[in-house]
Amino acid sequence: MTVYVRSLETAVPKTRLVQSEARDVFAAQPGLSRLGARLVSTCFDSAAIETRFTAVDELTNESRSDDPQFYDPATGLLLNPSTKVRNDIFGREATKLFVQAARSAMEACPELDLLDITHLVTVSCTGFFNPGPDYKIVRELGLNPAVQRYHLGFMGCYAAFPALRAGKAFCDADPNAVVLVVCAELCSLHVRTSNDPDTIMGSALFADGAAAAVITARPGSEETALLQLDHFETVLTPVGEDSMAWNIGDHGFEMVLGNYVPHIIDDHIVGALEPLLAREPELAALPYSSIRHWAIHPGGRSILDKVESRLGLTEEQLVPAREILRNYGNMSSATVLFVIRRILEQAPEPGDERICSMAFGPGLTVETALFTKLRQAPPALRPGQGSKADQVRELVAAEAPVA
């Protein structure tokens, strides 16, 4: 049975962070050592990021609050709220992104009714609350209260793949299933000033965003589908368990992102791809660059550099991943879906439009997938734009004859 992605939509908070401005704030904190200050400048400047988005409005100099919790622009000081304060914000702000992305994904499927959704899979590693985001989406969108709900929590940057794989499994088991997958992450909730290199790196990379996909194998799906889900594989590298981790601290979640991670990926990426490509021996016999599209999770610039070099890919094949990193930063589980969405927006080309996709996370875990691009997607919504329905109404109004 062939399973398809019918829609794939993204969402980000309204507050945009400029990388150079964020660097200056972090570098000016009074508790930094001279080495810490140098690391801030180096990490922020070498991250290949220009802008990111955050659900924490007060992380900009334009914000004003009588009781600042994260950043006081009057003094220039970064504050250090408790994990409870951060998680309370997650419950409120993540819900908005979960619902926004889910609604956009459904609006992009006019032939499907909200009550057609049979399964809902939500993903996040940046906060917890219950009733959780799966419940909130059901209530806010008006899904069938009996929809089967699943939440994948605390898996990290690769978690979109287990979610898509689950969606495919549900559709393989039930040809009438329609699965809504939603990833939303508020990584910026956990940034803080520190002299620790891992914490500094996290502050330079992480951002907030969400993505949602509608998955189905219903008859006729191929006519409107964007993407065909072909194969998934999971590999654990033999080393790296302590090099990438995500722990809960008293003042937010603590990211461990060792500088040896790109080297581990460099050493083991070929082996990680073997089980996936073995599914299609004709692909395994060809150079990696013969696969037209590569949707790589941009965990950082150096990771993309290692993937490009080790696999012999062209600069053009890494453009979608580098564009997402530059404009959005690392949004954990949602990020690779942004990259896939960017590939889907590209004009179609003659021949096979296969997509090989990879994401890396704690463990060190490597998730891989093969997809087939079926058609070009309309441009994704940008910050400040209305919903899909709003855009349609604006287009109709603009084309209406003047009385």
Image (cartoon, helix red, strand yellow):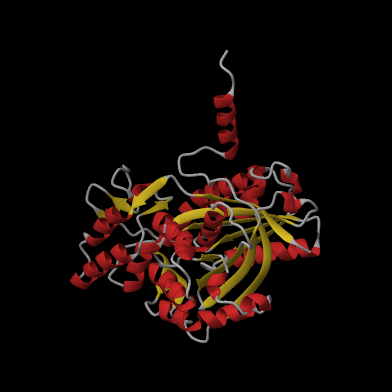
Q: How many numbered marks, from 0 up?
A: 0
Where's the C terminus, which quadrant?
Answer: top right
Residue nearest the observer in this picture, 346 or 234: 346
Left or right of 6 in this view: 44: left
Q: Residue at x 28, y 50 (%)?
A: 72
Answer with left or right where residue 49 lies relative to residue 352: left
Side of 367 relative to 57 (left or right): right
Q: Is residue 248 visible to us here?
A: yes
Residue reaching furthest to the top: 403
Residue reaching furthest to the front: 350
How far across and how far down the image is residue 36, in percent?
24, 70
Position in image of residue 251 (x %, y %): 39, 64
Residue at the spot x=23%, y=47% of the render? 74
Image quadrant where residue 70 sits: bottom left
Within the image, what quadrant is residue 104 found in?
top right
* Picture quarter with the N terminus: bottom right
**Residue at left offset 37%, top offset 77%:** 259
Side of 92 relative to 62 (left or right): right
Q: Quadrant of residue 131?
A: bottom right
The outermost residue toward the left is 34
The front one of 31 and 219 is 219
Residue 175 drawn at (x, y percent): 81, 58
Relative height, residue 88 to residue 234 (above, below): above
Where does residue 25 sit, x and y in percent of width and height?
26, 56
Residue 131, visible in the rendered structure: no
